[in-house]
Image (tube, grey):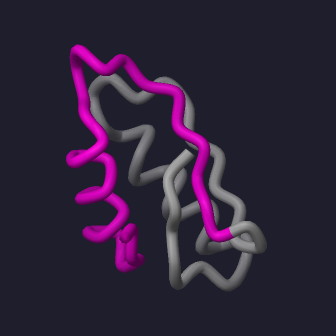
């Protein structure tokens, strides 16, 4: 589970989720704008949390 700030609707959730599942090694991403987080299922030998946070930022949101 990774914190994400700046989401305010279901469209934001979709943007974050799609950005993350596009990463090699990410199997699933479920963003929740109310909780300000995204639950990510990933293969740690293929992708790390730094890359995941970077993808969140590239999508226009903040992952502290």
Which image quarter is the C terminus in? bottom left
58 is higher (above) or lower (below) than 7: above
Residue 2 rendering spot, x and y as whole percentages: 50, 53
Which image quarter is the N terminus in? top right
The quadrant in which residue 12 appears is bottom right
The quadrant in which residue 7 appears is bottom right
Q: Please give the name of the residue rendered at 53% of the width and 37% of the height, measured from the top-left corner.
A: 40
Q: Please give the name of the residue rendered at 64% of the width and 56% of the height, measured from the top-left corner.
A: 31
Image side of residue 54 versus residue 10, left or right: left
50 is higher (above) or lower (below) than 16: above
Image side of residue 22 versus residue 16, left or right: left
Question: Depth check: 63 or 56 in front?
Answer: 63
Question: Depth check: 36 or 58 in front?
Answer: 36
Q: Please give the name of the residue rendered at 54% of the width and 51% of the height, measured from the top-left corner.
A: 17
Magenta stretch, residue numbers? 36-64
Residue 13 rendering spot, x and y as whole percentages: 63, 64
The quadrant in which residue 29 appears is top right
Q: Please give the name of the residue rendered at 58% of the width and 53% of the height, measured from the top-left corner.
A: 38
Residue that sits furthest to the front in the current view: 64
Magenta stretch: includes residue 13: no
Residue 30 rendering spot, x and y as whole percentages: 65, 46
9 is higher (above) or lower (below) than 32: below
Question: Depth check: 2 or 25 in front?
Answer: 2
Magenta stretch: includes residue 42: yes
* Figure disc tally: 0
Residue 54 rendering spot, x and y as whole percentages: 24, 59
């Amino acid at each position: 589970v990774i914190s994400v700030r700046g989401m305010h609707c279901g469209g934001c959730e979709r943007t974050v989720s799609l950005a993350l599942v596009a990463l090699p090694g990410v199997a699933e991403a479920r963003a929740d704008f109310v909780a300000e987080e995204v639950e990510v299922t990933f293969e740690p030998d293929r992708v790390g949390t730094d890359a995941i946070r970077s993808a969140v930022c590239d999508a226009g949101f903040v992952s502290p």
